[in-house]
Amino acid sequence: KTSSETWTLVLGLKEPASTFFFMDECADSGDILSQQRLSIRDSDDAGTLYKRMTQTALKQIEEFVPILARRSYKRIPQDHSKANYWRKRGRLDGQIDWRMPAQSIHNLVRGLTKPYVGAHFIYNGNDVKVWQSEPVQEATLNIEPGKILTVDALGIVVKAGIDAVRLVHIEPQVNLSPEQYL
């Protein structure tokens, strides 16, 4: 499940599902025993979605264990034309590319925030983790992505490929100022 929650948020998907499969020769390709859809909220991040997915999965288990014991379950064949498989996320998948739209950067941050490893950018040769962000509508044109627009008590606003993104919580704290490029 952990990889699917991360990718669901990073890719900006709106309706993941908690799914239990019968095992077959491939990963997650067997018939479906139980599937429950969830809706992604704008406020969801990796932690809140993981918690809701876990609660949903536990309810599913309570429902299907007695059915399995009675052998009265239904196997639901998957429509493999609608199935997807998530590859294992690598370190570079978490590196922020400032040329991406602000919403995509924000989705990356919320998909990789705690309890996961965090999205990051490189500053002075070191990883700086971004644990919380928010997209910012930015009308400024002709500014290269990665340029710091403002630094204040609310965070660091960085120009993205489209709009800007406010870095609300980074770690470690680094001394950044407007006009610098990340």
Image: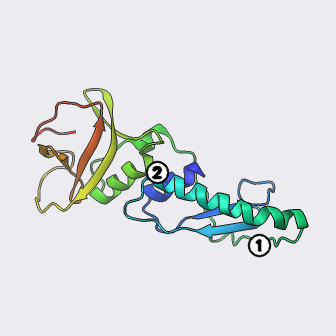
Question: Is residue 99 left or right of 69 when viewed as pictured?
Answer: left
Badge 2 vs badge 1, beta-carbon distance below 8 Å: no
The percent coordinates of residue 26 (x first, y second) are 75, 54
Height in image: 95 above or below 56? above
Badge 1, how many Cα within 10 Å: few under 14, some, many 20+? some
Kindly state the secondary structure of the residue where label 2 is placed: helix
Q: Is residue 17 above or below residue 107?
A: below
Asked whether, in this view, residue 19 is left or right of residue 118, the answer is right
15 vs 64, nearest the viewer:
64
The percent coordinates of residue 168 (x first, y second) are 25, 46
Which residue position is annotated with label 2? 46
Task: Identify the secondary structure beneath mark 1.
Answer: loop
**Residue under the point 42% across and 65% down:** 41
Image quadrant in which the C terminus is located: top left
Judge whether 181 appears above or below 67 on screen. Answer: above
Q: Residue furthest top?
A: 125
Rendering quarter of residue 55: bottom right
Which one is nearer the viewer's eye here, 116 or 146? 116
Residue at position x 45%, y 57% from top? 9
What amino acid type should be assigned to the residue bearing mark 1?
Ile
Q: Disc 2 residue type? A: Ala
Question: Who's the residue at 42% across and 62% down the image?
Answer: 12
Q: Which residue is mark 1?
A: 76
Task: Say left or right for 5 vs 173.
Answer: right
